[in-house]
Image (cartoon, rainbow, N blue to C red):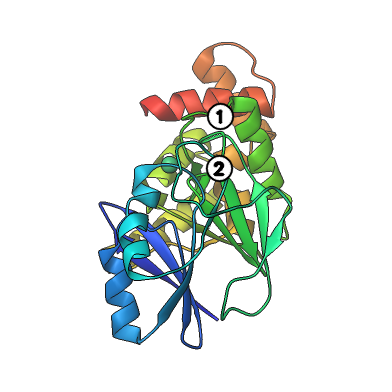
Amino acid sequence: MTIVPLSALHDNYIWAMQAGQACVVVDPGEAAPVNDYLAAQSLQLTAILLTHRHHDHIGGVDALCRRHAVPVIGPRSSQMPQVTQVVEDGERFACAGIEGEFEVLAIPGHTEEHIAFRYGSALFCGDTLFGAGCGRLMGGTPAQFHASLQHIAQLPPDTLLYCAHEYTLANLRFAREIEPGNPAIEKRQARCAALRAQGLPTVPLSLAEELETNPFLRTRQPAVSARLAAQYARPIAGGEAAFTALRQWKDQF
Ligand SMILES: [Zn+2]
């Protein structure tokens, strides 16, 4: 099994999973990078997986379906008419040519219908969790988003997170503002800056590293609470209240 990021649009990643000649793609915001990859590697597309309704994740689906007769697997949403196989939280399904099963996790917050796909130690998490950050609130509630991030945080620490955007360096600047005394953030900044300087992706993400450096997963850390209390000039409880305060701050950072 190989999982490859295909760059699309401005800073999106379409994930291509391949086994033998079969290929499954996640969140194709554009068709061309997928068709080019399939042709270059002599692969056959067997399914399209969608995490949520935003155009930069589904924009290529219609063109791909005109060329490839494949199931489009995604959440229930009136704004995703392309989905031919609706999946729910906890459901398992298989894709042609790929051994084993995918498991669906409902992770609402960025949008209300957002789901993730878990395959072995890989989690395709769309716009929910990014390197050292998370997506914006664009439909779900802060309580939902915080609970979804906690759900991800409780997966095995060797989980690899395949998110849909390259935002890690910008997010690390904010993480450093929140926890200037956290050496893991500084170390990660240096490593990711070197990767980006070579044009390489900083994804997939290690959940273990996110737990050490991502402020949105560190809402119960005393250092984070102290920084938020100073910024907002009032005490802010850990957990959901801290998540909400962090998200508001980051939106203006
Ligand atoms: Zn989105």
Name the spot of residue 33 as percent of width and height, x first: 28, 67
Q: Secondary structure at mark 1?
A: loop
Please name the residue shown 25% across and 65% down the image.
32
Please name the residue shown 49% across and 43% down the image.
133
Q: Is label 2's Cβ within 8 Å of ligand 1?
A: yes
* Image quadrant in which you'd find residue 193: bottom left
Amino acid type for the residue under numbered disc 2:
His
Residue 251 higher or lower than 156, as above or below: above
Image mark for residue 114: 2
Q: Which residue is mark 1?
A: 140
Amino acid type for the residue under numbered disc 1:
Gly
Q: Pick whichever, 93 or 251, lies toward us.
A: 93
Name the spot of residue 151 as percent of width and height, x first: 70, 45
Please name the residue shown 57% across and 46% down the image.
75
Q: Is label 1's Cβ within 8 Å of ligand 1?
A: no
Name the spot of residue 96 as percent of width and height, x first: 57, 76
Q: Are marks 1 and 2 in contact (CB under 8 Å)?
A: yes
